Image: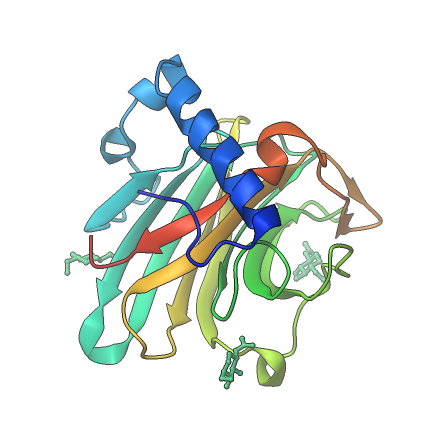
Amino acid sequence: MAGAAHHPSPNNMFISLLFLAAITCSSFSPSNAQSCASYTFSSNQLYASCASLPQLGATLHYNYTADTNTVAVAFRAPQSKAGWVAWGLNPNGTGMVGSQAVVAFQHSNGSLVAYPTLLDSYVPSMAPAAPKNLGLPVSDVAAEHVNGKEMVVYATVALPGKGSKFNHVWQQGTSVVNDVPAAHPTTGDNILSTGTIDFSD
Ligand SMILES: *[C@@H]1O[C@H](CO)[C@@H](O)[C@H](O)[C@H]1NC(C)=O
Ligand SMILES: *[C@@H]1O[C@H](CO)[C@@H](O)[C@H](O)[C@H]1NC(C)=O
Ligand SMILES: *[C@@H]1O[C@H](CO)[C@@H](O)[C@H](O)[C@H]1NC(C)=O
C-alpha cells in the first residue's frame, strides 16, 4: 500500500496532507472497493503481491526477489488507446523528478510501445532512455491494451540493493502527440499519484 513520503519538506508535507485526505475520501469510492487481487491478466501471469493505488484507479502487481534484488511488476490503469500510462521508482528522492519510469502508449503505426524513460525534470522528454543511462536496469518491458479500457505495462527492475522499500510514482495522460506522451493534467489526482511501496509486503 502506498503511503506518505519520508522526510517531508514543507512543500512535500502539504502534498502529503492532500495525499492523506485523498486516501480518506477515496476509500469510500467504488473504484477502491475492488481489490487488486481479483484482477486477472490476459496471459494469466501471476504476481505474489499487489497494491490498489490511491489515485487514478491504478493497481501495481509485483513479484519481489530479495536474493537478486529484482522486482517484476505489472502496472495497470484505466486508459483509452489514445492515451498513455507510466509507473516509476524514485531511488534517491520523492515525487516525479529523479524517477525512472516505464511508459506505454499506442504508436501511430498501430503498435503498442513500452520503454524505460527518465523523468529528469517536470517537462521530461519522455524519450526512450539508453540502457547506459538507467540507474536501475530494466528488462522484459512490454505492454498491452485490455478491452479498450485499460493499459498494462510490464517490467522487471533491478533494484539498488538497499532494501525493499521505495518511493514510487504513477501517472496517466489522455493524449500522445507525434508519438510522444503529452503532459498529464497538473491538478487533482494527477499530482497526488506518488507514495511509498514496500515490495516485501
Ligand atoms: C511470480 O512468482 C510466482 C511464484 O514464484 C511465479 O509462479 C510467477 O510465475 C511469477 N510471475 C511472474 C510474472 O514472473
Ligand atoms: C512501430 O514503431 C515502434 C517504435 O519505433 C516499433 O518498435 C514497432 O516495431 C513499430 N511497429 C510496426 C508495426 O511497424
Ligand atoms: C542514486 O544515488 C546513488 C548514490 O549517490 C547513485 O550511485 C545512483 O546513481 C543514484 N541513482 C539514480 C537513479 O540517480
Which residue in the rendered view is the most extreme toward the right? 178
Q: Residue at x 40, y 69 (%)?
A: 157
How many numbered marks have been drawn onto this rendered protein structure? 0
Residue 50, position as x, y percentages in the image = 27, 44
**29 horizontally vs 56: left or right:** left
Ligand 1's image quarter is: bottom left
Which residue in the rendered view is the most extreme toward the front? 10
Q: Relative to 174, is 66 above or below?
A: below
Residue 119, position as x, y percentages in the image = 66, 62
Q: Residue at x 60, y 85 (%)?
A: 132
Residue 27, position as x, y percentages in the image = 35, 20
- In the rendered image, which quarter is residue 191 located in? top right
Q: Residue at x 47, y 71 (%)?
A: 138
Q: Residue at x 36, y 22 (%)?
A: 32
**195 horizontally vs 10: left or right:** left
Residue 140 visible, this angle: yes
Of residue 170 and residue 132, the one placed in the foreground of this image is 170
Residue 193 visible, this angle: no
Q: Which of the colour schemes (rainbow, by chain, secondary structure, one colour) is used?
A: rainbow
Which residue in the rendered view is the most extreme toward the bottom? 132
Residue 120, position as x, y percentages in the image = 69, 66
Q: Relative to 146, is 2 above or below?
A: below
Image quadrant containing the N terminus: top left
Q: Relative to 22, is 123 above or below?
A: below
Of residue 110 and residue 72, the one placed in the foreground of this image is 72
Of residue 11 and residue 143, the one placed in the foreground of this image is 11
Of residue 157 and residue 186, the one placed in the foreground of this image is 186
